């Protein structure tokens, strides 16, 4: 609904804003579970039904959905990505972190999650990870929760 001036009528719809967070990583390669951080932002937003956008503004970090039950899987992810982009290979981009750029490119810098009944929709075994490929560093994280 809209007023005659074309402005929406006030409603209980929560205002969306971009949250800026800092996440510390401790290893060169690390898969940091940020599911709880995101759920807290959704809860704080008051959004019951909508979308949660997650973005890392970095070229050597990424956002991944995967199993967060067995920590051993992270070792396999690391080994798999090392096969794709070995750190000791000769690259054109030779500042020593090309493997990290390539791993981040494969996984991607952003994801969207659906929100229903105030909860992120995730599979039983799924979690959201900030992937660090050139740490340890302090990584920025941008999150926006938008109501339907
Ligand atoms: Zn680089």
Image (cartoon, rainbow, N blue to C red):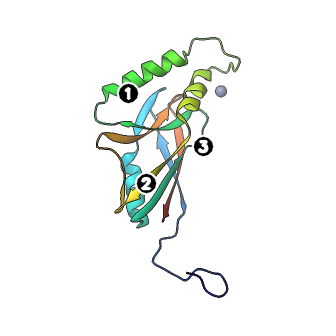
Q: Nearer the viewer, residue 110 or 142?
A: 110
Q: Give the SS element for disc 3.
A: loop
The residue mark sitting in front, 2 or 1, is: 2
Badge 2 crowding class, 10 Å Cα cut-off, few under 14, some 14 to 19, many 20 or more, is some
Q: Position of residue 86 (x, y in %)?
A: 54, 15
Q: How many marks?
A: 3
Of mark 2 and mark 1, the one earlier in the sequence is: 1
Q: Which mark is residue 108?
A: none
Q: Position of residue 137 (x, y in %)?
A: 52, 35
Badge 1 crowding class, 10 Å Cα cut-off, few under 14, some 14 to 19, many 20 or more, is some
- Ligand 1 in which quarter: top right
- Residue 115 image-quadrant placement: bottom left
Which residue in the structure is indicated by mark 1? 74
Q: Is residue 127 above or below residue 144?
A: above
Q: Position of residue 92 (x, y in %)?
A: 71, 17
Q: Which mark is residue 57?
A: 3
Q: For the residues marked 2 and 3, what is the alpha-carbon distance in whole angstroms? A: 21 Å
Q: For the residues marked 1 and 3, what is the alpha-carbon distance in whole angstroms? A: 22 Å
């Amino acid at each position: 609904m809209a007023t005659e001036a074309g402005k929406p009528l006030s409603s209980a719809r929560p205002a969306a804003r971009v949250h800026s967070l800092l996440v510390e990583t401790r290893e060169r390669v690390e898969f940091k579970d940020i599911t709880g951080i995101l759920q807290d932002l959704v809860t704080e937003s008051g959004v019951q039904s909508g979308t949660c956008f997650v973005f890392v503004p970095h070229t050597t970090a990424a956002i991944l959905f995967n199993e967060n039950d067995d920590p051993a899987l992270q070792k396999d992810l690391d080994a798999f990505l090392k096969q794709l982009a070995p750190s000791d290979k000769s690259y054109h981009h030779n500042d020593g972190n090309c493997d990290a750029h390539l791993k981040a490119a494969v996984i991607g810098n952003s994801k969207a999650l659906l929100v229903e009944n105030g909860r992120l929709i995730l599979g039983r075994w799924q979690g959201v990870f900030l992937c660090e490929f050139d740490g340890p560093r302090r990584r920025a994280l941008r999150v926006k929760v938008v109501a339907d």
